Image: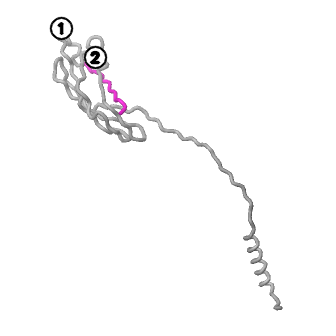
Amino acid sequence: MAKLNKRTKTAIVTAALVFGVSGTAFAYWTQLGAGTGTATTGTTVAVVVNQTSTITGLYPGGTPVALAGNFNNPNTAAVTVGLVTASVTTTSAPGTCLASWYAITGTATPATQVLAAGTAVGAWSGLNVALVNQPATNQDACKGATITITYAVAAG
């Protein structure tokens, strides 16, 4: 019989171990798992309605003057808004020049729109303001008066 050198003996022992281990069955456990996590949705803040039209020269019974504007959307995502409405809420001469003497007429357009995130986005128009003639009332107190128009926008 031939003598095996040390290198050959090491190779044979290694091969035997590899074949021996690969033929061995391993026992193991299986187990299913479960867990929970959370996520939150974002919130929005109010969109600001801006008037971009300059209104001057209103007088009792005069032609209604067009109102127009845009929006500031301070949210980080686009939002959908609906119809813009307006009302005259105060005058610079309260008690003598009544806010109720002014009328907002028309329908704002577009009725619904998607506003991108950011400032000065979207646009609206279609509303008008007028100083309504009060035939039995002296409206001199409204000469030079400044009115406050309050705007609201519905959710779209």
Could you say which is closer to the camera, residue 104 or residue 56? 104
Residue 156: x and y in percent read 35, 33
Q: On the rendered structure, is 109 left or right of 75? A: left
Q: Indicate the colouring scheme.
A: one colour
For label 2, the SS is helix
Residue 29: x and y in percent read 72, 55
**Going by the picture, which residue comes out furthest to the bottom?**
1
9 over 66 or under it: above or below? below
Earlier along the polypeptide chain: callout 1 or callout 2? 2
76 over 68 or under it: above or below? below
- Inter-mark Cα distance, 1 to 2: 17 Å
The quadrant where residue 9 appears: bottom right
Could you say which is closer to the camera, residue 108 or residue 123? 108
At horizontal 26% and vertical 30% (from top left) the residue drawn is 108
Q: Looking at numbered disc 2 in the image, what kind of residue is underneath it?
A: Ala
The quadrant where residue 54 appears: top left
Secondary structure that dominates the magenta span: strand
| Residue 150 on the magenta segment | yes
Q: Which residue is mark 1?
A: 136
Residue 99 marker: 2
| Residue 133 on the magenta segment | no
